[in-house]
Amino acid sequence: MLYELAKPVVMAISRVLWNPTIRGVENVPESGPVILASNHLAYCDTVFLPGQIRRTVHTLGKSDIFSGRSLPQRIGARIMRGLHVMPVDRSGGSAARSALDAGVAVLEAGGILGIYPEGTRSPDGRLYRGKTGVARIALATGAPIVPVAMVGAHEAQRGRRFFPRRRPQITAVLGEPLLARDLASAWEGADQSALLRGVTETVMERIQELSGQERSEEYSADVKRRLRAAAEGGRAPARRDISR
């Protein structure tokens, strides 16, 4: 209910202040399950993408924003849940499995799931290595994946924590749907890890084609940790094995 009440108000204000635009919205089916797989450049992505989609979009958000015990933190978590944001624990293991299950449940109910395959915002505007959760969910449900490129968001919000500049204009570009089960046929006979990686890479390639971003073969979270370590004067962590 909160989502449905807040969405028109927030987008009315957003259109006056920032006038975000969208292209390719016809690629989102009028009904049935669909995954919106987007690059992630800035906080405003989480407003300007779902706000311009007619249907309700359920998204996955980092579990940190749900874990605080103070009254303001608990109120914030309640609001986020009301906005259809579901917590995802990025530490992996069974915690990550529960987030994937939550995404599957949304799709099995015929809803839209918004997911950021990079796992976290890009620190420098490049497109980073995608995590395989998007492939796992798509293969488990058969839901089509609509690749999404947020264009202009990094430049508009560079150096600002919450509110982007009015220029450049931020545009969501939606590509034609991809069917993970069709993509998986190219890896017939491969092990599960190779199949998931192959499908994920195809999705990331399509996002890059729409966004024009430079690609990085690292995970965004690893780069952020290295940058934090350097800023704190500590020893940068070793690069992770990216063969997964």
Image: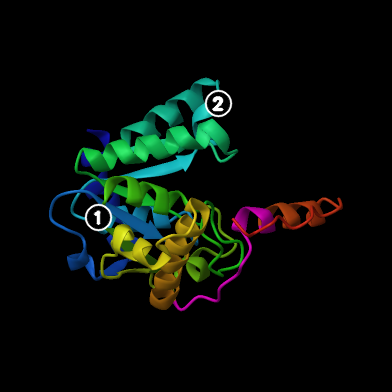
Instruction: Say which element carries label 2.
Output: loop
Does 126 appear above or below 179?
below
Q: Is residue 133 visible?
A: yes
Q: Is residue 20 left or right of residue 228?
A: left
Q: Which residues are magenta?
A: 212-223
Q: Is residue 225 left or right of residue 172?
A: right
Point out the frontmost of discs 2 and 1.
2
In the image, residue 218 lies in the stretch drawn in magenta = yes
Q: How many marks?
A: 2
Quadrant of the rendered image containing residue 231: bottom right
> For the point 21% across and 40% down, which residue is it?
4
Q: Label 1, on which residue?
A: 12
Instruction: Say which element carries label 1.
Output: helix
Residues 186 and 126: in front is 186
Q: CA distance from mark 2 to mark 1?
A: 31 Å
Q: Position of residue 169 (x, y in %)?
A: 38, 72
> For the point 74% across and 52% down, which residue is it?
228
Residues 213 and 197: in front is 197
Q: Is residue 151 visible?
A: no
Query: CB under 8 Å between callouts 2 and 1?
Result: no
Chief secondary structure of the magenta portion: loop
The quadrant of the rendering that contains the C terminus is bottom right
Q: Which label belongs to residue 68?
A: 2
Q: Position of residue 97 (x, y in %)?
A: 47, 35
The quadrant of the rendering that contains the N terminus is top left
